Amino acid sequence: MSELFDAIDALLASRATLPPPEERRRLRKAHGLTVDEVAGALKVRRATVSGWESGKTEPRPPERDAYARLLDGLAKLYPADTDANSDTPAQDTAVRGESTGAPHQAAAEPPPLPAPLAAPPAPEKVSPPASVPASPAPRATRPSSAAPPHPVPGSRPPALSAERNAPSRPADTLTAPTEASSPAPAPRQPSTPHRSSGRKAGRGSTAPQPRGADPRFANGPLAVVDIDDDGQALAYCVGGLVLDIPAASLPALVEWTLTEARLGAPRLHGAGRDADPLLVLTGAACERFGLPPRLTPEERLDGRLPEDHRAVEQLAGAEWLLTRRGLGPWAWIYRPAQGGRRQCVQLCIPSWDALDARHWHGAADLPPAELARLLGTYASRVLTPRGTTAVTGLELMTALRPPTRAGAPDETGRRHSEHNPGSLGRDAIDCAPCEAPDGHPLLADLPRFHQRGPAEMLLEEAYDWTRPLTDAECMRRHLVGIDVNMAFAAASNGAIVGLAQPPVHVTGPRFDAKVPGAWLVDLSHVDLSRVKVGKQWHTLVADQLPSPFTPSGERPDGPAWYATPTVAYAVELGYDVAPAEAWIRPESGRFLDDWYKRLRDAYVATMADLGVTEDLGPAELLAAMDDHKRRDPGAAIVVSAIKATVKGGIGKLRERPRGDGWRPGQPWPALARPTWRPDIRAAVISRARVGMHRKIVALAAATGRYPVAVLSDCAVYAADGPSPLDVLPYDTDGRTVPGSFRIGVSPGMVKHEGTQSVLWAEGLREEYGQELNLARYIKTGDIAAQDTGE
C-alpha cells in the first residue's frame, strides 16, 4: 500500500502548483539566493533555473517537487504583500572594514527599464497639490500577466511629494556610503522654503511600482537637470517623470536630492552598497547653480574648477566635501557617514566633456528627456555611471563581487566585516615582476634605458597581424571582414584568475591549466602545419596562419612569459610544454563571471531594442544588422557604451600612470586599488586571442580558408561573394563548422564588419606597403593620414 501512496504522491508532485516566473525570481532574490546556489541545491544547470524564472521552461519531476518546496518555504518567509522595508530574515552585511549590527535588505529588483529610446512626448505641467498626505508611499502591487514588461511610452511614474513641511518618510532617506542598508532618521529639510511637485504627461492615478522595487529609489537611478522656458529647474527622471526642483544653489540642490528626490539604485550584491543618486547637469542648469557652462582651457587641463571658485566655496560653507577629483566633469559631493548612513550625490556635466564622444557619441547634445532615457537604460542594465565607461566597467566588478561581507557576531553580538570569498579583497597586492609594466616600482633597479624582451615581461596583447594575399586569393573579388561580438567579455566568461593572494614564484613547475599565473616557457617548437583540432590531427598551411603566442602573429624564437590560457592552448594543439619557472596564483576563482553575465544581458537586451535578437538565423541576423543603428539612435548609443565598458574595464586592470609629475620607478595612484590587476587583464586578452585562433584553425581545417588579416576581434577573408555567408559554411539546418565562427548576436559570435574589393586592398598595399593591416580599414574602406604616419 505504501508503494501506491508513493505513486500517488509522485503524481501530485508532478502537478505541483508553482508561482509565476516573476514571483519565483522575487522569492529567490528576497532570500539573497543566487541562481547558482539554487541550481546547485537542485542539482541542475544554472541555465535551467534561469529558464524557470524567465518562463521559457517549466521544471519536471523530480526537480519540480523540490523546487515547489523551496518556493513554498520562501513564500512563507516573504509573502507577496510584504513591503520592501518590512523586517524579514536577511543576512547582515558590512563593507570596507566598517562594522554594523544593522540587518541588510535583500537586493531589490532594478528600477523599471525605460521604454524604447525614441523621443518622449513633451511633459505636461501639473500644478502642485495643495497638501501632501503623511501616509507612506503606496504599496507596490503585482502587475497582471498581461501588463507590458516595461513602461508604456508617455506614461509617468509616481509624482513626488509637494510641500516642504510634509512629514518625511524613511523610504526617502539615504543609505550608508560604506555600510549596509538600514532604517535612516528623518532627513533634514532644506533651509530655503520651496515647492516641489511631480509632473506627469496626461492624467491618471499613481503608477504602481513593480514588485520588489525599492521605494527609496522610486524615481530611478538618475535625473537630468535642466531649466525650462519659465526659468523653473526640472529633473528629468527615468520613465518620463519630471520633477520641479526648488533649490536655488548647488548646496540646496544636493540637499534636495538626498532628502526628497528619491533617486539612486539598489545594490547588485547583498554585501555591496546602493548606488548614489546621479545628477546630470545641462549647460543651462550649470549657470543656474553657479557653475560655468564650459571649462576654461586651464580648468580642462586640471580636470576641475579651482578651489577658490564660488561654487566650491559654497559647498564648503554648507559643510559638503569633494573627493580628490574636486569639482570636475564627474564629481562626488558628500558628507562623512553618520551612524553608518551614506550622504553622497554624484554630478555628471556633459558640457564639460563628461560623456566621451567616442563612446557616447552625440548623447551630450540630446534633449534632457532623451538623455535621461538613454542614461537610465544604461544604468538599469549595467550600472549607474561612475565616470568614464572604463571607470564604470571597473566599478561594476566590485559592485558584483564586493571585497568584504558581514562576519559572524562576536561574543558581544557585534558583527565585523570579513573577506568576501571569490572577491579580490580590500587590499592591493603586488604583481609579479614579469607582469609589471615599464616604470613600475618593482623595476626601479633596472638600467634606465633597458628594453625588456619576451623572456623578461608578460606580453599578452590583442592580435595585429597581416600577410600578403596568395595568387588564388587575388583571383577572388571580395575581402570580407567578420567581427567577434564583445570578444573581451566572452573571454572573461569562465576565466579562472587569481584572487586576493599575491603570486608565488616556483622553479621548474609542472604546467597545470587550472592554475592561473605567468609561465616562462619555450613554445617555438609548436608547428602550426600539423595541429590537433578536437581529437584529430590536421595538416595546415602554417605561413597563412598567425601564431597564437604573439600579438604580432610571428612565431616565437625562444622562451617567453605567457599567461596560463596561452600555454594551455599549446597543449591543446598537441604539443608538450616544459616551463622553466612561473609566478602562480594559489587562490583562484571565476571572478569575472557575474560581470560577464550582466554585460552580456545588457548587450543582448539593447540589441533586441534595435531589432537584432538571439532567435534570428544567420541570414536573418545579417539582414537585421543592416542600418540597425538608425532604428533607434539612442539604443545604438547605449550599445556603444556597453562595448566601451567591457574594453575599458579590462584595460583599467592595468591602468598606467598619467600626468607630468610622475617619474619611472615611482608608484602611481592606481597601484593602490585592489582592482589593479595586470594578471587578470593578461588572462582575458590571452583567452580572447587564443579563442580567435581556435576559430581560425577550425575553419581552416574544415574548409581550407585562411585569414589575410586579423586585428583584435576582426578577421578578414578573401571570398567570391560580399557576405560572411560566402566565408562561413552553413548547411540547410543552420549548422556550421564546430568550434569555428558562428553568426549571431551573443558575445563570442560574429557579425559582418565590412566588405571591400580585392582591388581596393591591392591599391592600398601598393601605396602604403604590404604591412598595412587591412582589418583596420575593412569597415569603411577609408584610411586616415594618422594611420600611415603622414
Image: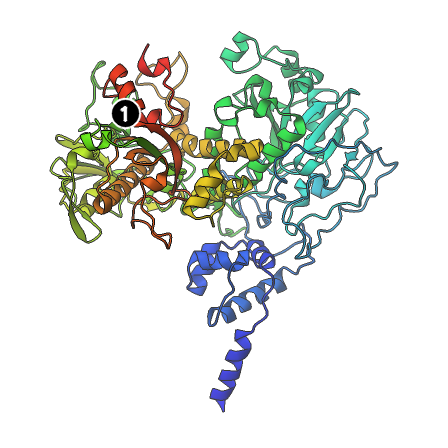
Vertical placement of residue 395 versus 72, above or below: above
Kindly identify the amino acid type of the residue bearing the numbered disc 1.
Leu
Mark 1 element type: helix
Residue furthest to the right? 130
Mark 1 packing: few (<14 Cα in 10 Å), some, or many (20+)?
some
Q: Which residue in the structure is indicated by mark 1?
A: 442
Q: Is residue 636 left or right of residue 206?
A: left
Vertical placement of residue 109 versus 314, above or below: below
Quadrant containing the C terminus is: top left
Vertical placement of residue 74 versus 732, above or below: below
Q: Quadrant of residue 565?
A: top left
Residue 665, how many percent across, how many down? Answer: 30, 18
Q: Is residue 403 something that shows in the picture?
A: no
Front residue of 646/661: it is: 646
Q: Residue at x 45, y 63 (%)?
A: 41
Front residue of 264/466: it is: 466
Q: Residue at x 49, y 52 (%)?
A: 408
Vertical placement of residue 768 versus 638, above or below: above
Q: Is residue 117 left or right of residue 7?
A: right
Residue 469, how many percent across, how many down? Answer: 22, 28
Residue 625, how many percent across, how many down? Answer: 47, 38
Residue 627, how many percent across, how many down? Answer: 50, 33
Q: Is residue 620 something that shows in the picture?
A: yes
Residue furthest to the left? 525
Front residue of 438/357: it is: 357
